[in-house]
Amino acid sequence: QSAAAARVCALAPVVPVLVIDDLAHARPLAEALVAGGLPALEVTLRTPCALDAIRAMSEVAGGVVGAGTLLTPADVKAAKAAGATFGVSPGATDRLIAACEDEGLPLLPGAVTASEIMALLERGYTVQKFFPAEQSGGAAFLKSIGSPIPQVKFCPTGGISLKNAGDYLALKNILCVGGSWVAPKEAMLRGDWAEITRLAAEAKRLR
Ligand code: 3PG
């Protein structure tokens, strides 16, 4: 189930987690992040324009646009229709997983306990999101879970920034990290796309 998610996670050390309030920001934001070397983009379905933002960003050359915050089968359908090429969910339910498999939308499902990780592994998900990462034990947890379950690889998100990303990326079971720090709201409001390209390039150099 995870081959496509693994390819997305291999594109760069950081997947920007994006909350887009203004549709006009979508395209220049995607261009700025891709220019800085971060092609995989997670647009969270947390704002009214998120689906239109996915549509707009999908037209940006070099970008690989996915939908985050998938909670329901309806979210999955809408994300797929908008052009999302992968999905990310904070956790995982039977209904959500079935919807992604039915729609053919590669899913990065969330897990935070050994049992959740094992349940997803049983279903073939060898690449999982660890969320909220810092609040759930952080890099120390992921290092420990890598001993009994080394075959599951993670994209941790939640509370990660330039300061601690390296702690995660140094671990064998981490493919990439996710975070919102590369696309600060203030820079978007100012239209300071050069600053976002700078932050993306700095994040790209993490590995
Ligand atoms: C989220 O889903 O909000 C992400 O995990 C991003 O978290 P962050 O804002 O702490 O980077």
Image: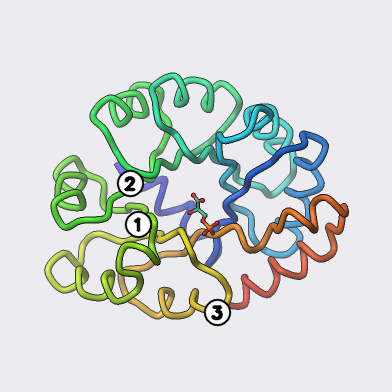
SS label for mark 1: strand
Q: Nearer the viewer, mark 1 or mark 2?
A: 1
Graded by Cα atoms within 10 Å as few (under 14), some (14 to 19) or many (20 or more), the crowding at tag 2 reads some
Q: As drawn, is 169 to the left or to the right of 184? A: left
Q: Classify residue 97 by image quadrant.
A: top left
Q: Which mark is residue 130?
A: 1
- Please determine whether, in this image, residue 122 is positioned above or below residue 23: below
Spatial CA span between label 3 and label 1: 18 Å
Query: Which residue is at 71% across, 58% downward?
Result: 184
Q: As drawn, is 38 to the left or to the right of 190? A: left
User: Is label 2's Cβ within 8 Å of ligand 1?
Assistant: no
Residue closer to the observer: 6 or 95: 95
Q: Which mark is residue 163?
A: 3
Q: Which residue is mark 2?
A: 2
User: Is label 1's Cβ within 8 Å of ligand 1?
Assistant: no
Query: Is the C-beta separation of discs 1 and 2 under 8 Å?
Result: no
- How far across and how far down the image is residue 21, in percent? 72, 38
Q: As drawn, is 111 to the left or to the right of 174? A: left
Q: Classify residue 144 by image quadrant.
A: bottom left
